[in-house]
Amino acid sequence: MTTIQRYVLWEITKVFLLCLGITVLLMTVGGGVNEGLKKGLPPGVILNMLPYFIPEMLRYTIPGCMLFAVCTAFGRMAASNEITAIKSAGINPMELMWPVLTLAYFLSFFTFWMYDACAAWSRPNLHRVVAESLDDTVYGVLRTQRNFKMSGFSVTVKSVQDRKLISPTFQVAATDSQPSIYLEVEEAQLKTDPKTGILQLICRDGTVEFGDEGKFEFPDERVIYLDHLNSIELNEDNSSPANLTLKAIPRQIDREKELVAKSKVKLEEASSGDDAAVLDNAKHNLKHHQKRLYRLQAERQRRLANGFGVFCFVCMGIPVAIWRKSSDNVSTFFTCFLPILLLYYPLLVIGEQTAREGTFGAAPVWIANAVLIVIGAALIWRVNRN
């Protein structure tokens, strides 16, 4: 690699890292803290959650920050006639572009990996932080919103007085070891056992309903242990494909294929019967499993296509920055980003929706990337020619 190539690569890397650091900091700390305080989460819980927001922010900010870095470096070089001087020396501008394109190529794979980091690390740990501080989290939210919901648990209250919940209503989803719980009481208190970490619901003067076991009234104080809330994990079988790791997706595809086959058999059996409700239920189940199967089959390609948005943005940014010959990096950035906003993202949404329908497989998720690369390649060819 020549000196000029190392220079260009270093200039872009500096601007990219600076822009990325500031953007992620503002979005994570500013946005995350502000949103957490609005929802009434305790400050300690918010601070513990902040590190796990970073992968979520990175996968959204890397493409834009890389585009800004490219516009800054190549725009300044073009404005100071460095690109013209390089051409006059008989050097093809592509010699300056290919190291940057290579960097964008590897950054695309890093962005793709961020999706897996979110599913395997960020979201489970965010849930763990909430579960470990569940009582404080619930109290904080209830004081501001009067209701709180999380996976398998919801509570609505009339008011909160210190640590007392006035006229609360609780709903707890069923687990393998415990039926569903519906509880209405005059007042209650939430407390986490410091030794076991199990959330305890201390209540009095109320009515509790345990699944199909019936409804019971009690005037005295009762303690209900909500131990399953502290060990809830993201259930692969019911989780959105976006929340699954790449390792888990093939298992879920095989599972959904089996469920689709069973649903088709049940639909055939229901079609031969006279029960309309059974037939409608069979159709609904088949549609549900078929839809999830298509989404699972498209998920890996969807993430990869989103990751390669970095490479596509750079393909657009380099020739536009050289063509504009302006040291105003902000205006150059928006000159590139506006067509991306109006063309790339709508095509990306359409491609993802088409892929989820399963008509053309996972190929439609690459439509937006293909269009941007064709436009970028044409612009690069024109810059090199002129």
Image (cartoon, rainbow, N blue to C red):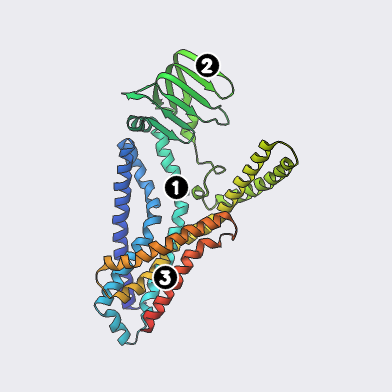
Q: Amino acid at mark 3?
A: Thr
State left or right for residue 346 relative to residue 281.
left
**Front position in the image: 197 or 287:** 287
Name the element at disc 2.
strand
Q: CA distance from mark 2 to mark 3?
A: 67 Å
Residue nearest the viewer, comparing 176 with 306: 306
Look at the numbered discs 1 and 3 and tell me whether their residues touch, using CB distance below 8 Å: no
Residue 145: image quadrant is top left
The residue lying toward the viewer, choosing from 167 and 133, is: 167
- Judging by the rendered image, the residue that carries numbered circle 2 is 216
Mark 2, residues whose alpha carbon is within 10 Å: few (<14), some, or many (≥20)? few
Q: Residue at x 36, y 74 (%)?
A: 319
Q: Secondary structure at mark 3?
A: helix
What amino acid does circle 1 point to? Trp
Q: Specify the quadrant that holds the C terminus.
A: bottom left
The residue at the point 24 percent across, 77 percent down is: 80
- Give neighbour class at mark 1: few <14, some 14-19, many 20+ (Cα, 10 Å): some
Which residue lies at the image location 44% right of the left edge and 50% below the top edge? 118
Of label 1 and label 2, which has the lower sequence position?
1
Determine which of the numbered discs, if any, sits on residue 102 in the image: 3
Name the N-terminal-most of marks 1 and 3.
3
Q: CA distance from mark 1 to mark 2?
A: 42 Å
Q: Position of residue 241 (x, y in %)?
A: 53, 49
What residue is shown with label 1? Answer: 121
Badge 1 element: helix
In percent of width and height, residue 227 lies at 48, 29
Vertical side of 248 occupied by 188: above or below: above
Residue 13 in sight from this viewpoint: no
